[in-house]
Image (tube, rainbow, N blue to C red):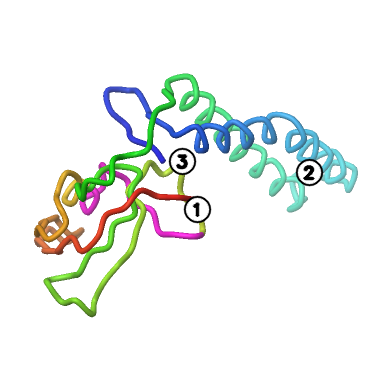
Amino acid sequence: MTQTSDNVTWLTQEAYNQLKAELEYLSGPARTEIAAKIAAAREEGDLRENGGYHAAKEEQGKQELRVRQLTQLLESAKVGEAPATDGVVAPGMVVTIAFDGDPDDTLDFLLASREYASADIETYSPQSPLGSGVNGKKIGEDAEYELPNGKKAMVRILEAKPYSG
């Protein structure tokens, strides 16, 4: 779980450990693996027409960008507690909303920094239009946010509970 404010990212110990492990993997074994892919592709011949080489170099660039992102994030991170269970939406919580007050049209999502996104649950940043609209609202309250086309949308907060992984 994360909460970002004033260049400090608050992480639970679990989130910090997970991101630290990812950084260690990308900085060590993953670098060795990508270097081996590049070397193998280089041996195939002409680099101008070598798709495997160019794909490996692109993968290496993305990997190095992620290493820089994680390094910056972890350098400014503070380990703290999970959000309270007082019914107020805050980063680190799983939020259930109903669109336009329709209790059948719902969405569950994690309100957290994108660095903590997982395949298990959709994640919205507290800075996103929906995230900023629901952040700080209580269960039962309505929240308004701006759609990409500039129109406004309304949702009702049905549930807010701390993310348990």
N-term-proximal mark, 3 vs 2:
2
Q: Where does residue 64 sit, x and y in percent of width and height?
A: 61, 32
Q: Is residue 90 left or right of residue 29?
A: left
SS state under label 2: helix
Residue nearest the viewer, comparing 34 with 130: 130
Residue type at mark 2 is Leu
- Judging by the rendered image, the residue that carries numbered circle 3 is 115
Few, some or many C-alpha atoms within 10 Å of disc 1 (few <14, some 14-19, many ≥20)? few
- Check the image and report above or below for 147 versus 19: below
Which residue appears at 40% of the width and 59% of the height?
A: 122
Residue 118 disc label: 1
SS state under label 1: loop
SS state under label 3: helix
User: Disc 3 versus disc 1: distance between alpha carbons?
Assistant: 9 Å
- Judging by the rendered image, the residue that carries numbered circle 2 is 47
User: Disc 2 versus disc 1: distance between alpha carbons?
Assistant: 36 Å
From the image, state whether disc 3 or disc 2 is nearer to you: 3
Few, some or many C-alpha atoms within 10 Å of disc 2 (few <14, some 14-19, many ≥20)? few
Q: Where does residue 10 sit, x and y in percent of width and height?
A: 38, 29
N-term-proximal mark, 2 vs 1:
2
Magenta part of the chain = 120-131
Residue type at mark 3 is Glu
Residue nearest the viewer, comparing 129 with 102: 102
Residue nearest the viewer, comparing 25 with 18: 18
